[in-house]
Each structure stands twice: as C-alpha cells, then as structure tokens.
Image: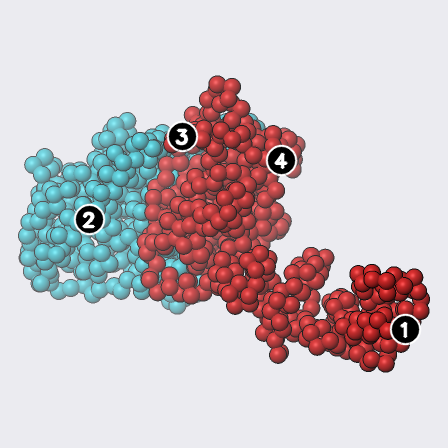
Chain colours: A cyan, B red
Amino acid sequence: MTDPSEALASAKATADRLVKAKRFNACLTPVRELRKALVTQAQATHPSGVLYGMPVAVKDNICTLEFTTTCGSKILEGYRSPYEATAVAKLKAAGALIAGKTNCDEFAMGSSTEHSAYGRVLHPFDKTRVPGGSSGGSAALVAAGAVPAALGSETGGSVRQPASLCGVVGIKPTYGRVSRWGLVAFGSSLDQIGVLGRSVHDAARVLSVISGRDPKDSTCEDRDPLRLPNVPESLQGFVIGIPKEYFSADLDPAVRRACDRAVRLLKELGAAVREVALPHTAYAVPTYYILAPAEASSNLARYDGARYGPRFDGSADVRALYRTTRGEGFGSEVRRRILLGTYVLSSGYYDAYYRKAQQMRALIAQDFRNAFDRGVDLLFTPTTPTPAFKAGEKVDDPVAMYLSDIFTVTANLAGLPAISIPIGRIKGLPIGGQFIGQAFLEDEMLEAAYALERVVPATEEA
Amino acid sequence: MAGTAPPEWETVIGLETHVQLRTVSKMFCGCSTAFGAPPNTNVCPVCLGLPGALPLANGLALQLAVRAALALGCTVHPRSVFARKNYFYPDLPKGYQISQFEQPLSTDGSLSYLSPDRGIATTTIQRLHVEEDAGKSLHDRFPRQTAIDLNRCGVPLIEIVTGPDFRSPQEARAYLLTLKQLLEYAGVSDCDMEKGSLRVDANVSVRRVGEAVLGTKTEVKNINSFAYVEKALTVERDRQIAVLEAGGKVEQQTLLYDAKTNAVRLQRAKEESHDYRYFPDPDLPPLELREEFIAEQQALLPELPAKKRERFVEKYALSVTDAAVLTADRAVADYYEAVVHAGSGADAKAAANWVMTEVLADAKDHGDGLRVQPGALANLIGLVRGGTLSHQAAKRVFSEVAEHGGEPRNVAEALGLIQVADTGVVTGWVSEVLAEHPTEVARYKSGETKLMPFFIGQVMKVSRGKADPKLAQRVLEEKLVA
C-alpha cells in the first residue's frame, strides 16, 4: 500500500470490521472515537513507512496518545497518558494505524481475560469460552479478522497463550529486544511487548518495526532492529530439541497428537530432532508466581489516588484514601498478587521466597543454555496444556489458572524469544505449538516458524 | 542541662547524612534540579512515576558519587545494585524510592576531624550509596489540606553512614563541618543545609562508662541546620540519661527534633517501623564501573583539605592553625596561593596575615567575594616590605582597591600615602611633635624611654601616616638624646 486513498480506505474498512467484532468485547475504545481516530491517522501518516496503512490494535497496558490507557483496571479509568510508548511511536513512524486499545486482564494479570474491570472477552469461535490472556483482546481481534496484527504484552505467556487458544501467531521477543518505555509495568524483569498476528509474517514485520535500541529504557539492548529472515525452503541443518519435561505422561492426548504431527513435519522439512532435558522446568510456575507478584507489588504501589486516576474516598486521612482507592480500584486477582508479592518481600520471608526464587530462575536459564550449548538451535513444545477452556471454569481456582502458563513462563524467566503458531484443532478449538529460541536469535526462530506454518494443517483436527 | 554529659555516662552517636549531588538534572530523568522553582514545574513522566515510565541513571551524578566515595577513602565497588525501598507516602509518587541496599556503591571509608574533646579523631564511613530524593509535603499551605511539590522528587543524593563513633554532640558537629568542607572541596555538593542539600539523621544511645554493650538507640530526624545538630543531640542524650537514671528503659523509636521548642517528639515507635521490602530494581541493570573510570574520578579530585593543610605548613612555614584557617575554604586557599605566587611573589607569612585578616574580613562584609585581585594584594604587600607604605597606610589602600579597584601604588599615590623616607622632611615632623609635647620630652629625658612609641605615633599622625616609622624612630632617638 503506498497510496493515501488506500490508507483511508483501509482505515474505514478496519473501523467496519472492529464494529463487527464488538460482540467479543475485545476492543475497549468506543467505536465512534475509533473510527475518527483511524481516519485522522490515515490522513496524517506518510506513505513511505513499511507498515503504511496497516491497522495494529494495541493492548490497553501500552501507553498511547490517541486513546485512554486503563490496563483493564478501574483504578486507571479514563487515564490518558501524556506520552506514548516507544513501540507505539515506532509503529506510527512506520505508517501503521493505531486501531484502538484491546481489553486485557487487569494489569496483565491473568490467563483468560476474565479479570478485566471492563468485562470478559469472548472467544471468537465459542462465546462460552475464554480467549486466553492476558492479551485476550488482542488475540480475539486478530482471530476475528478485525486487524492483521495487534500488540500484546508478556510477563509469563500472555501473548503466546491466547495466541494458542485463538489460533493465531504470538511472538514474545528476547527480553531487551523491544523497549518497555510506555508499557505499564507488571513484572519488570519479565515484561516484554509482544505481537499477535494472523500469520508469522504479519507478526514478524510488526516485531521488526518495534524492536531495537531505546535510550529511554536501560534494560533495552543496544541493538539494531530485528531483520526479517526469508522463508526457508527447508530446515536442513536445524537441530530442534524436544524437552521431555513438556511432554509428561499426563499431557492431554490430543495436544500430544498435534505436537507429534508438527514434529513429524519438522523432520520432513529436514530438521534434526532430538530429545533434551530441562530438569528445573517443574519449578518454573512457582518461581514465576513469587517473582512476578513481588515486582508487581512494588510496580503497582503508585496507584494510590493521590496524583491521577479516580479516588474512591473523600476522606482527608491519607491512609483511608489509600485503603479505599486501592481496595476498590483493584480487582481481586490484582489484590491477590499484591498481597502475595508483599509477603514474599517482607523481612523474614525474603530469603525463603524471593531470594530462593531468583536462584531457581538462574537454574532455569542455565537449563536452556545447557541445551543450546549441546548443539540444539531451537526447542519445540506445546504452547498450552489445553485448548480454550470455559469461561468461569478456573476463575475461582487461581492455581488451576496459573497452571495454564506452565509451558510459557519458562521463556520469560530465561529471557528467551518464543513464538506460538497454530498447529491444529481439538474438537474445533485451535491449539498452538511453540518454538523457544536463543537470546536475540529471533531470526532463526522465525525461519522455523515460517517453514512449519507453510506445511502444518492448522485448521485440521489433530 | 550543660553541654557535657555527667561523667559516668558515655554518649554514642552515628550519623546518616544525605547530600545532594551538584548536577543540573535529576538522578533518573532530565528534569532540572534548580532550587526554588514554582511547585511541580520541574517534573516529567519519570519523576512523577506515571504508568510506563522508566528511570535512566544520570552519569554525572554517578561520577560525583564516586568522587565523594574516593574523597572519603571508601572502596568503590566495581558492581553495585540499585534497589527499591518500598513505602507509601503521597510525596513518593512511585511508592518506592530508588536507592541501594545489599550492594552499595562503596563501603569502608574514614574521615578524620578535630574533636573538641579528643583532638584528631577518626570516624569510620560504613557505606556511601546513591539514591533519589522524595518530593515535599507542605502541610501549612492550605488549611486542613496537604500540598505536594514534586520538584525535589528524583534529585540525586548520596547517603553517607558513619559507624557509632562520636562520643558527644560536639564531635558529631565537628565531623559534619569537616564532611561539608571535604565535599565542597571535592566539588560534589554545595552542602547548603538551608536549601536542604545536606540533611542529617542521627542514631543516639548512651551507656555507663566502661560498659561494652551499646545502649538502645533512638533515631533523631529533622535536624535542619548546623546550629541544631548539637542542640538536638544534646536534648536527646540528656533525655535518655534522665530516663535511665530514673530507672526506666530507652525505647527504640524514631524522633523528630523541633527547633522551636528545642525538644524531640515521637514520630514512630519500633512496632510501627516500616518494612521497606528492599529488592533489586528490575528497571536498572547493575551498575558496573570499570577500573579506569574509578581511576579517572580519582584523578579529577582536587587536593583535599587535610593534604592541603599539611602542604601549607611544610611549604609556606605556616603554623597548623594558620594553615587550617587558610584551607578552610578551597577558594580562599587558592587565593592565598595565587598571592604568594603572583609576580615576584609575596612573602608567605605576610601574605597569610593579610589573607586571614583584611581579606577574610572584607569577604565577610561583602558576601564572600574576594574583591582584591591576588596580584594587587601581592603588590601591596611588596610596597609595605619595600618601605614605600606603612602597614597602616596599606590597610587604607586595601580598602580603596577593594571598593574601587586600581593598582595599589597608584591608589597610594593618589591618596598621598607613599611613605616619606626623606630625612629632612621627617626631621621637620619630629621637631614639630617635640615642640608640641614638652612635658613628654622632659619625662623621656629623665628615663621614661617607654614613651618612644607615643612619639612615633604622634609623628605618624602629624605626617598622616606617610612618615617611614623606622626613620622617624631614628631621628627621634637622635633628637631626644641630644
């Protein structure tokens, strides 16, 4: 697309598609406002950008100038950021149109997008089911065909898990590949902006645009933007590791079948496949649920009603202001994690929980390094233990909910890039397979994903 | 109570000093650190703690912090870690302060100071770390409401923690003044307590002399000026002694000093003390300092006060006291050396006397300005030494030059102060004086030779300071004997 009239047409068509997708409650931006903003952007943007005219929806925990940024929380209701995220600025500079803000679990805490103050997101294939989370709004919009790509964010699988459940592609880049400036912090040492797309290529080209150095984020690596690889003819020369801990005896047989089929296809593409061991995998979820809440308890301390966001109390007593604002402004899952995080950082418990979890994190990262040091280029695993589950099924059982991240949290803990692509259907519901790559070698990971995507019968029963 | 504790009690004090680093911008963002700006104007998403904003460490602040650590003889660690100190307060927008905890920038330094009780004493510096300041809560701006000014929020600070090494409030004060002098010298901070760029918290305990175990300590906060340091610590020391002598127990608590009432009041008891839940800040990578960087900061340190004092004693043959006065302020020390080295060079001892008296007095009266150029003062001293000006006349010339500038010789000439060494002219003045004071002449001649200074004084008066006093004395002696 290089013609301004095409961009305008794209903007209008996107608005129409978003109106149609309204029933999934995936987009938080009011339709009228969205249509106006899309048209304004299409008229303003310059046709030279590599994403010229491409609509990209943005998860509501990423700061935008055009729309409010509420993080799916009552505590930021109506909040308008005075600045925008680096990723958003780069998208706009590349000519993309910011296609509204997507619904998500409050402050990205959740795996079903049921924990949003603005209502749950419906799975586009089955409204009784969840789209996954926390980037469930972004995944649902892409799956519904409303936008070709959307930004999500990951702390423990929040892009890949909904991608798997909604049958779209989800990429979590290496920690430090994409600037976190303007991404509202949840677990800062784990958080990365990721991309959901209807294809590997759509997701990858958005990732390429938003990646690269940013002096505003000290944890963002001083590297050039990611260069997109070509679609390879074969995977000759690739060594793909299959970590046995991800294929335990109690793995859902249908998920196993889907993965086995994908592995067969990888071999047919010329890749060498071998089993590897990541012995600390079992500790990943508990480690994650100590570290992420610990950081969250500190990151979310700023929401106190004193400076911005609604106040839930008129009392002059500052303690009462904190209590009611935070008590009413945060939902139950956020409060649970703040309490958890506060506990594990408390004096007397720090060594038993936080410090131990940091040590375990290092061991988990070492597991991956060991595998890669033994000549493995990439790992292949299921993305999620099951396809989309029913709404309400796990919402009152936090541990069951947390276990839906069992295959994804490891890449966040180790800071590695990972991608989920659809590899089949289970009773009509999509299921994803995951490649985990080496740090900053997204290009190799994308090559494998391109190759598998071409041959895998993603819409066929496994 | 008096300034000293009863002899059976020993006071133990440790100090935590927060010093603002001399930077143009804040510790983790580009906002200005200028003092006195309208409330909430030096702010941005970072220091306001807006959602999604991230800190970026200020390189200059780190350089200054390392220089301060080196000036205090601390070991600067090649790797230190920023940590979050979590607590809720409206003037702390992020709900945490970025500081350092388990792995501070530097540890294990020391500072020697002149104790009024023990002579030269040395305190250990346990640690020196970098952190950001909080904002300011203003409780008196609006009735029944608290106003928040976040201009200070994020201003770079170092915290300097001593061991429990001071044995009296006077020692604590002496240390603080020495610390201030050192940090000013090092160019690290302006150490202006009035502007809040140097703040002190003190840990105070008492024990009976000879006891090995430290007593229960309290923390005294809100000591806002050097004048209050001694007062606040004395008040708290005396309070603790009174409690213990009455058979009570000192409670571990945090106290606020109130200068108006000269008393301490409870801020919070031990049970209410915060659990700060320190943990490494995931937004900032560990601070890695290369050896060359640390060496560079060492090289950028100027000569520090103690070294300079020693050198002045040795090189200029000054007394320790004079050297201390001259090196108290780096600008004065530099000025003194400039006078000594200007042109053909002034006599070191004479220059010292001039700087310690006329120059410092003039500076005190005129806002610390050293108004007479070092070269001009050197010339003035030369005129006295060469007999062209009397000391008396030179002082007048100094004032004139300070006020209106000019070259001392020209000024002296214009004022008609050039000393007259012409025997004929001086003899004329002497004769005049002797004729006017026949009684004193008679007394002198009958043996009261102690009247000589009187006659010289009269000659200087008659000559309006122009007579060469040595010549005048010689002529007087001749005439009075004759």
Q: Earlier in the sequence, mark 3 or mark 4?
A: 3
Quick check: B212 above or below B73?
A: above
Crowdedness near tag 3: few (<14), some (14–19) or many (≥20) residues, C-alpha within 10 Å: few
Q: Which of marks 4 and 1 is nearer the N terminus?
A: 4
The residue pinned by badge 2 equals A365
The residue pinned by badge 4 equals B259
Residue A187 pos. (x, y %): 33, 43
In this orientation, which residue lies closer to the viewer: A74 or A457? A74
- Res. B476 image quadrant: bottom right
Left or right of residue A216: residue B444? right
Quick check: A226 above or below A361?
A: below
- The nearer-to-camera label among 4 and 2 is 4
Whether residues under marks 3 and 4 lie with C-beta atoms below 8 angstroms apart, the answer is no
Q: What element carries label 2?
A: helix
The residue pinned by badge 3 equals B211
Identify the amino acid type marked 4: Ala
Q: Which residue is drawn at 85% across and 76% down?
A: B426
Q: Mark 2 lies on which chain?
A: A
Residue A133 pos. (x, y %): 29, 40
Q: Which chain carries label 4?
A: B
Left or right of residue A301: residue B190? right
Q: Give a yes or no on whether discs 4 and 1 share a subunit.
A: yes
- The nearer-to-camera label among 1 and 2 is 1
Whole-number angstrom distance, CA of label 3 to CA of label 2: 52 Å
The residue pinned by badge 1 equals B431
- Res. A223 image quadrant: bottom left
In this orientation, which residue lies closer to the viewer: A281 or A64? A281
Q: Which residue is drawn at 65% across and 60% down?
A: B356
Crowdedness near tag 4: few (<14), some (14–19) or many (≥20) residues, C-alpha within 10 Å: some
In this orientation, which residue lies closer to the viewer: B63 or A209? B63
Identify the amino acid type marked 3: Glu
